[in-house]
Image (cartoon, rainbow, N blue to C red):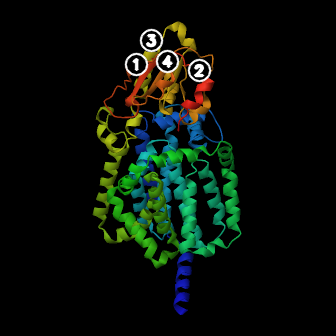
Amino acid sequence: MERSDTKSREEGDSRLRGLPSVAAGPIAAVAASLAVLLTALSGRYGFHRDELYFMVAGDHPDWGYVDQPPLTPLLARASTALLGDTPAALRVVATILCVASVVTVALIARELGGDRRVQSVAACCAAASGIVLGLGHLLATATFDMLAWLVISLLVLRLLRTGDGRWFVAIGVAVGVGMENKQLLGLLVVTLFLALLLVGPRDVLRTRWLPIGALIALVIAAPNLIWSAANGWPQFAVAAGISEDGADDRVMLLPLLIAQLSPLFLPIWVAGLVRLWRDPSIRWARLIPVATVLLVAVVQFTGGKSYYVLPLLMVSMAAGVAPVVGRVRPRVLVAGIAVAAAVNVVIGLPVLPPAAARFPNALNAEVGEQIGWPEFVRSVADAWHRIPEADRARAVIFAQNYGEAAAIARYGPQHGLPAAYSGHMSYADWGPPPDGADGPVLLVHAAENRRIPARFTDCRLVGPVDIGHDIDNQVSENVIRICGPAPVPWSALWPSLRTT
C-alpha cells in the first residue's frame, strides 16, 4: 500500500512540475529557415495532380467530397484567390502548416520537460525530416492532417500533465477542425482514448469538460459528417479501396516509417518510445507508446498508408531528443541532422532539374507527379484539333483520372480546350456531359485500361501523351484515343464511368 502511495505521489509531482522556458529564438530561427527553403523551391517543377484537383474542387464548394472533407479544397481556393493560381502561391499554405508543425514538435519536447537545447534539437529534427519537407512543398490533405495530429497530441499531453479538464475544450476544437480536413483523424482519437483506458492516467476522464469537448468536436465536424451520411459515406469506400490494394503497404510499413522521417532519426524516436514508457517523471505520458503500437497494428491490418503513423512517431522523436542529447556528442548530433536534412531535401524537394529527377522520383513518386502537366495538355490539344472543327461544339473530352481532368481545366483554356469530364472521385459529381454532347469523344486513359474505350464506339489510337521529360509518372502511362459518340446518352452511361 505504501509503495502504491509513493508511486501516486511521484506521478502527481511530475504532473504539477513547471515547464522550462520556451526556446523562442532558436525555434523561430529553425522555422524561418524552413520557410525560406520551402518558399525558394515552391515554384519549381509544377502542380501536383492532387493540387490541381483541389483547385477544381475549391471551385465546387461543398460540405464534402467523395474522397475528403472540404477544408483542403477551401484552403486551395483561398490561397489562389488571394495570391494567384501558381504553384508558389498555392503552396504558401503548405509552408505555413509545416512551419507550424515544426514549432509544435518543439513545444511537445518542452511539454515533456525538454530544456531550451532539447527544444531546439527537436525543432531541427522535425524540420529535417522527410515527411515535413515533402508535405511542406505540396498542399495535400496530409499537410494539414500532420499539424492537426501534432496539435492534438500536444493538447492531450498538456491535459495529462496538468490534470486540468478544461483542456478538453481545446482538444475538441482541434479534433472538430481536423475532421473537416480528414476523417482519418478519428483513428487518432480512438487510439489515444483506448491507450488512456489501458494505461491511464484515467482520472482526467472524471470531469464535466470531457463531454463538453466531445460536443464541441461533434458540432464543428457535423457539416461534413451529415454530408457523408447523406451520400452513403463515400470516404469509407475510398478507404476500402486503399485497403484492398494495401499488400505493398503492409510489407513496406516499417521500412517506410524509418525512411520517411530519416534512418538517422530511428535511434531518437526509439529512445523516445522507451522513455515515454519507462521514465517515471513523465509516467502520465505512457499512453503515447501504447497508442503508437495500436495505430501501427491497425494500419498493418488494414493496409493503410505509413504516413498515418508518422505524427505519433514525431511525438516520440520529440520525447527521445532529451536522452540522445545527453549521450551523443554535439558535433555528431549536428552532423547527423545535417546529413538527414541533405538527403531528405534531395528526395523530397525539387532541387534537381526535371531532367535529373528520375533518381528522387524512384524513391518518392510524388516528385514525378509534379512534372509534365503543361506538356501533357499540349498533347491533348493536338489531339483535340484533329477533330473536325464543325464537330467540336458537340465533342467531349473524358479523362480517366482527376489529375488529368484538372490539368486540362488549368492549362486547357490557353489551347482552346473545353473543360474535361471524368468519372473519378468527386469529378463524377460534377458531370456528366449534357446528353446533347453527342459528337466525338476524346479519351485520355491509362494504356492498360480497356474498360473505358469499350464504353464507346469506333475508337482509334492517337498515341501516347507527351510530357516532355523522360520520367516515370502516372500521366506518362496515358494514351489518347478519339472515339465516336457514346452508344447511349451520357446520363445513362455515367454510372458505369464512376470510379474511386
Front of the two marks 3 and 4 = 4
Q: Kindly tell me whether residue 59 is visible in this rendering.
A: no
* Res. 488 mark: 2
Q: Image height check: is 24 above or below 416?
A: below
**Spot occupied by residue 412 in the image (x, y as percentages of width and height):** 50, 21
The amino acid pointed to by label 1 is Leu
Q: Secondary structure at mark 4?
A: loop
Read off the residue under disc 4: 457
Q: Earlier in the sequence, mark 3 or mark 4?
A: 3
Horizontal arrangement in the rendering, residue 437 relative to residue 378 (left or right)? right
Q: Earlier in the sequence, mark 3 or mark 2?
A: 3
Whole-Å distance between the Cαs marked 3 and 1? 12 Å
Read off the residue under disc 3: 386
Read off the residue under disc 1: 461
Whole-Å distance between the Cαs marked 2 and 1? 22 Å
Disc 2 crowd rating (10 Å Cα; few below 14, some 14-19, many 20+) is: few
Residue at x 41% of width, y 20% of height: 379
Horizontal arrangement in the rendering, residue 163 relative to residue 340 (left or right)? right
Q: Secondary structure at mark 3?
A: loop
**Spot occupied by residue 331 in the image (x, y as percentages of width and height):** 28, 62
Which is nearer the eye, 400 or 323? 400
The amino acid pointed to by label 2 is Val
Q: Earlier in the sequence, mark 2 or mark 1?
A: 1
